[in-house]
Amino acid sequence: MNSSEVLRYCPDLLHYVRRASREVMVGSVGVGAKNPIRVQSMITSDTRDTAACVAEVLQLAGAGCEIVRITAQTKIYAANLENIAREVRAAGCQVPLVADIHFKPDAALEAAKWVEKVRVNPGNYADKKKFEIREYSDEQYEEELYRIREEFAPLVTLCLEKNRAMRIGTNHGSLSDRIMNRYGDTPLGMVESAFEFARIAREMNYHQFVFSMKASNPKVMIEAYRLLVARLEQEGADWNYPIHLGVTEAGDGEDGRIKSAIGIGSLLADGIGDTVRVSLTEDAVYEIPVARAMVKPFQEGALNRFVGADAAAGCLSYDPFSYDKRSSSVIEVMGVLLGGGQTVRVVTTQEKWNAVAHKFSALGDFKPEIIIEKSGVVAVDPRIDSEIVAINESETPQFVTLRDGIDLEVIHGYRLLASRLQARHPILLKDTLEPVQGEVDFQEALLIAARNIGSLLCDGIGDAVLVQGESAPGQSFRLSYNILQASGVRIFKTDYVACPSCGRTLFNLQSTTQKIRAATGHLKGVRIAVMGCIVNGPGEMADADFGYVGGAPGKINLYVGKTAVKFNIPEDEAVSRLIELITEHGKWVDAPPAVISE
């Protein structure tokens, strides 16, 4: 029996229903229950700089941020939260403040005196990671849990006394050695890590907390949150704690927005999520309009069309807790192979193809591969039995998609199609079933396309993609490829894991990330992590080939995987030393000459 038959994370896979949760108050702001999905962010200023922190908090609140997080890496930093909170309130701003805690229980105890909420990471709150491989006996494991309780219980007591909220926020890649050795660096390990702390809180009758399961890989992040919700359901109705959503180290620009929309948007579409933070390697204020746009359709009930009870029966065709590509047959379309183990293809219309055909050489990796009008694709409504039967009875595999204009949400419609269609038939994914004409808001088109197509790709559904929500040909092709890259199904360029700036950052993340992109952006299939401090590395670089991590002010440590190999490199030499490291490991190639379009 697979996990999808045992665990249930979503009340209805074909109809948007928001998960029921209890309300947790963060100051005067309610999270969960009937409250709107809250938008939050994190300031980047040094926590010891009161004026800079206050100015940034006020700027975020003015932009629509509803909860603001501030790093408190030591007790000394945490003590200044008193001054920051006082000045923010004196300015007439009531936005709740959250202390971000890693490694230092004494910092958490100090911070809880002054702010409305404390975020703790179970992987490092009471643990110092040594990356040790060892077997824990049941007795030794219990001893570790007792030690954690001794460290964590005082914070719970203080939060009870002062009516503070808490986020128990697990991060993929920063799990404790204890969890790593028993569960591995897995979604299950992430959930168990959080549950250790939640059980202590519940034993002390403390319930003012929310959960998060962040990862930089959208597939891992989606699976971890689904597993968390399913496990909460298993534990019982009173484990209905709110959920905070986020993709860590999403990066900057278009890539950061796409990766965030895939992870966060997919879960929101399944009714999961009571508060969100979009983590971009940009000034924090730019995160707010992205997050607000992401939650808007769910606040307004726009994605609420019902498939129908009969059509929805037994719809699940995949395991939602473990990625596995749908096993379609390989077919040839316009001389291109798709389906099966072939790469996911990019489809466009004849009109867009014609618009750029004269400059294909200048499009580089962003060229379309198939014209939909010449593809022979069969468009259907998966609720109509006769249409599905006709395809399933065909002797040869058919290329199939949803018909434009039908009243189905994209994710729900393709789930239904995949469940009713024999697996041998390849599927063409569309971002919208209502093709646009004329100019559109590109960010809105990007967020919708990434949410709809990316979510399905992360569940193994889809052999080709067609972006219909962006009318500009070049932008639609680029968007298609970038969604494939962020979903991890077609790696055609360098992949970057870049954390957002915060008060712990030891160098300018934005300029440094751009500098590294400029030097390495032509390396196909290489994954580089750019981390501002040791908190977000090496653990958070779980899937990266190479890492560029702030070790001390003005000094950089370079990693291969999770292993630090070069230390205390002057910042002005670090990018060239990173290139040397990539070269040493046989993954460097020179950039091709630039193609100049006519």
Image (cartoon, helix red, strand yellow):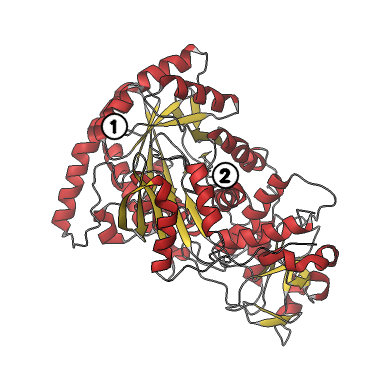
**Residue 251 in sight from this viewpoint:** no
- Nearer-the-camera pick, 347 or 552: 552
- Determine whether, in the image, residue 228 is placed left or right of residue 341: left
Q: Quadrant of the C terminus?
A: bottom right
Q: CA distance from mark 2 to mark 1?
A: 38 Å
- Nearer-the-camera pick, 186 or 319: 186
- Nearer-the-camera pick, 453 or 584: 584
The tag earlier along the polypeptide, 2 or 1, is 2
The mark total stands at 2
**Is residue 396 positioned above or below 13 on the image?**
below
Residue kind at label 1, given as amino acid type: Thr
Which residue is tagged 2?
18
**Is residue 436 positioned above or below 45 on the image?**
below
Helix, strand or loop under label 2: loop
Q: Position of residue 407 (x, y in %)?
A: 76, 55
Which residue is tagged 1?
74
Residue placed at 45% from the left, 28% from the top?
25
Mark 2 Cα-neighbour bin, 10 Å: few <14, some 14–19, many ≥20:
many
